[in-house]
Image (tube, rainbow, N blue to C red):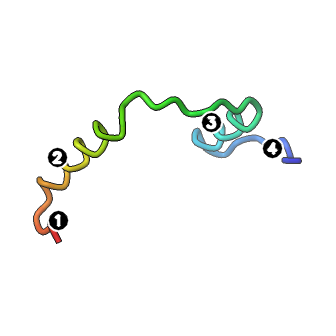
Amino acid sequence: MLATKRPRCPICKDVQTWIADPTPYVWTKSADEILERLAGYLNRIPDSED
């Protein structure tokens, strides 16, 4: 069981909130949409084609 301590940062607070009431992540895009966007980012980075 986790001790209930005061969070030290905003992320810690979010994590503690999620631990108290976990919910599954809901994907809003398909894998193809995500990979397509990632490819766009990689095309803008020099030497990322290796």
Which residue is tagged 4?
5
Three-letter amino acid code of the residue under disc 4: Lys
Under circle 2, the secondary element is helix
Residue 15 point in image, percent of width and height: 65, 40
Crowding near the residue tagged with mark 4, few <14, some 14–19, many ≥20 C-alpha atoms within 10 Å = few
Residue 18 at x, y percent in the picture: 68, 34
Q: Residue at x 66, y 30 (%)?
A: 23
| Gap between marks 4 and 2 measured at Cα | 42 Å
**Tally of marks:** 4
Q: Which residue is under mark 3?
A: 14
- Residue furthest toward the bottom? 50
Residues at marks 2 and 1, CA–CA distance in whole angstroms = 11 Å
| Marks 4,2: beta carbons within 8 A | no
For the residue pair 16 and 31, the one nearer the viewer reads as: 31
Q: Nearer the viewer, mark 4 or mark 2?
A: 2
Amino acid type for the residue under numbered disc 2: Gly
- Between the C-alphas of marks 3 and 1, the distance is 34 Å
Tag nearer the camera, 3 or 1: 1
Which dot marks residue 40? 2
- The Cα–Cα distance between marks 4 and 1, rounded to whole angstroms, is 43 Å
Please, what secondary structure does the residue beneath circle 1 have?
loop
Mark 2 and mark 3: span between their CA atoms?
30 Å
In space, the residues marked 4 and 3 are separated at their CA atoms by: 13 Å
